[in-house]
Image: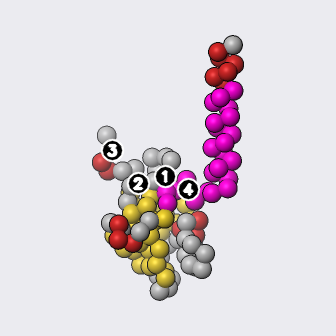
Amino acid sequence: MFNVLRTSVIAAALFAGAAHAATAPQQAFGMAAAKAGADRQVTIGADTKWVNVDNGDTVTFNVDGKAFTWHFDTLHQEEAFDLAKIAPAGVAAGKVTVYVASNPLYRG
């Protein structure tokens, strides 16, 4: 009986997490942050193909005169995704890939 209850609770939690990720996919990569908290700034130009960041970094991206700041908090040790997934509406991030490395403070 306990195993059935535990399995049901785990399944419900996984389902709720999947539903939440489907409605807000960018949250799997972190969250918007205040510019004042940025560790560094990156300017995205027409020739920019990728950006390297570490999990836990807070970065301000400058794209065609528009800026946004993002705190990276990915679910995996390493992740790669299009910058457009986290760019706010009105910011044309183009085809730039963000490579998120594991946090150097926690590397073994």
Which one is closest to the eye, mark 4 or mark 1? 4
Where are the magenta residues, as a range? 8-31
Q: Nearer the viewer, residue 63 or 2?
A: 2
In the rendered image, which residue does mark 4 sit on?
Answer: 27
Whether pointer 2 and pointer 3 mark residues with C-beta atoms closer than 8 Å, the reply is no
As for residue 85 lying within the magenta part, the answer is no
Residue at x-position 46% and y-position 78%: 67
> Which quadrant holds the N terminus?
top right
In this rendering, the label closer to the viewer, 4 or 2: 4
Measured in 3D between alpha carbons, the distance from the residue under mark 3 to the one under mark 1, in whole angstroms, is 14 Å
Q: Secondary structure at mark 3?
A: helix
Q: Does 10 sit above or below residue 92?
A: above
Residue identifier under label 3: 106
Tag 1 residue: 74
Q: Position of residue 40 (x, y in %)?
A: 34, 70
Q: How many labels, in total?
A: 4
Specify whether residue 3 is in view: yes
For badge 1, the amino acid type reads: Thr
SS at circle 1: loop
Q: Is residue 43 above or below residue 20?
A: below
Residue under label 2: 55
User: What amino acid type should be assigned to the residue bearing mark 3?
Assistant: Tyr
Mark 2 → mark 3, Cα distance in angstroms: 10 Å
Give the quarter of the figure containing the C terminus. top left
Colour scheme shown: secondary structure
User: Tag 1 or tag 4, which sits nearer the N-term?
Assistant: 4
